[in-house]
Image (tube, grey):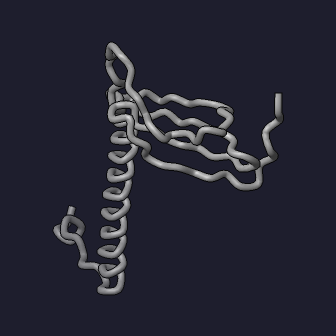
Amino acid sequence: MSSDEDEETPLDPAVERVRQRLKRLILISVVTLFVGLAAVVAAVLYKVGPSRDKPALTAVAGETMVDGALPADAQLLSTALDGRTLALTYAEGAAHRVVVIDLATGKVLRRLRLDGLAPPATP
């Protein structure tokens, strides 16, 4: 073997620039791949982790009065309970409305008017 074969010949400057650019692109691709993989692992761990919902209210003896939640002539159509709030859907004349009540305090959180619904059937 001659010493010429052992030594690498320097690359042409244009080829060296292409090699450096390719090296940089591969590095960017690898970093992007690992960031995406970390995001997927984080999302899976977030989904299988403990629930972050607010705990439901504990049972309390007695009643809580909620004054003024429904008008006197309202016809209650439905209720929905999620543990901390109560939603009451009612008809007042020809209009449908929803009132949301906080069960811990008994305060009305929000009132909504639903437009475009058919009037409730009278029993």
Please tell me which residue lies in front, 51 or 111: 111
Q: Can you see residue 90?
A: yes
Q: Is residue 114 left or right of residue 17?
A: right
Residue found at the far bottom of this picture: 13
Given the current orientation, which residue lies at the most extreme left position? 3
Q: Residue at x 71, y 55 (%)?
A: 115
Tell me the quadrant of the picture where the C terminus can be found: top right
Vertical arrangement, residue 43 with respect to residue 57, above or below: below
Q: Nearer the viewer, residue 101 or 40?
A: 101
Q: Quadrant of residue 9?
A: bottom left
**Place of residue 35 in the rendered image (x, y in percent of width and height, measured from the top left):** 33, 53
Position above or below: 62 against 57: above
Quadrant in the picture for the N terminus: bottom left
In the rendered image, residue 81, in percent from the top left (x then y), is placed at 51, 28
Q: Residue 62 appears in which quarter of the rendering? A: top left
Residue 60 locus on image (x, y percent): 32, 16
* Residue 45 makes an appearance in the image: no
- The residue sitting at 82% across, 33% down in the picture is 122
Badge count: 0
Which residue sits at x=68%, y=45%?
Answer: 92
**Percent x, y for residue 23?**
31, 68
Residue at the image position 36 percent from the left and 47 percent from the top:
39
